[in-house]
Amino acid sequence: MSRVLDLYRTSTTLPLVGPLVGKRLFSFAFSQVAPYFWTIRPRFTVIEPHHAEVVIPKRRAVKNHIGTVHAIALCNGLEAAMGVLAEATIPPGKRWIPKGMEVAYTAKATTDITCHADTDAAQWSDDALPDTGGEVAVRVQGVRTDGVVVIEGTIRLWVTPKR
């Protein structure tokens, strides 16, 4: 099990803390390791192999000139979700780095946004990821509280053996 997944599971099952506070503690700790993500105040709600979710709270610091969640804040949320998915999913002995991101903005981000990242097991198989390296396409989307998708796309990862 990856360190990130292990830390998430541990922090959300602490008896005196409880899952809600544990998720907040994990979110804070994650943002200390990768400080740029603290700008969006991520709230990780689901982390498991092949799936992750993080909420971007709609607040003044992430709003644009029309009062919606800024496009780059949305991309930061998608990248945070992708990052924990990759850490929770990657096979032992492999490493990853983002290679590119393609997104489409499909509606106004007028509420808190839940960012989803998803992959399939076959994408991480030895056949898909040879010793020379391979690409994993992570499907990402951001959803308003009313269920409307506001951003969707793909983040491509380059996965290679650890050296």
Image: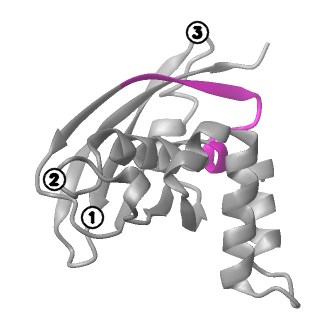
99 up-or-down from 110: above or below: above
Mark linked to residue 47: none
Q: Name the residue under label 1.
A: 143
Work out whether mark 1 precedes mark 3 in sequence or the reverse, and give the earlier one: 3
**Residue sitting at x 67%, y 26%:** 95
Tag 3: Cα neighbours inside 10 Å, few (<14), some, or many (≥20)?
A: few
Task: Give, as a single range, the part of the protein colored magenta.
Answer: 87-100
Coloring scheme used: one colour
Dot 2 and dot 1 residues touching (CB under 8 Å)? no
Work out whether mark 2 precedes mark 1 in sequence or the reverse, and give the earlier one: 2
Q: Mark 3 points at which residue?
A: 132
Mark linked to residue 66: 2
> What is the CA distance from the residue labelled 1 to the residue labelled 3?
36 Å
Magenta span has 90?
A: yes
Image location of residue 48, percent across then percent down: 59, 62
Dot 2 and dot 3 residues touching (CB under 8 Å)? no
**Residue sitting at x 75%, y 41%:** 33
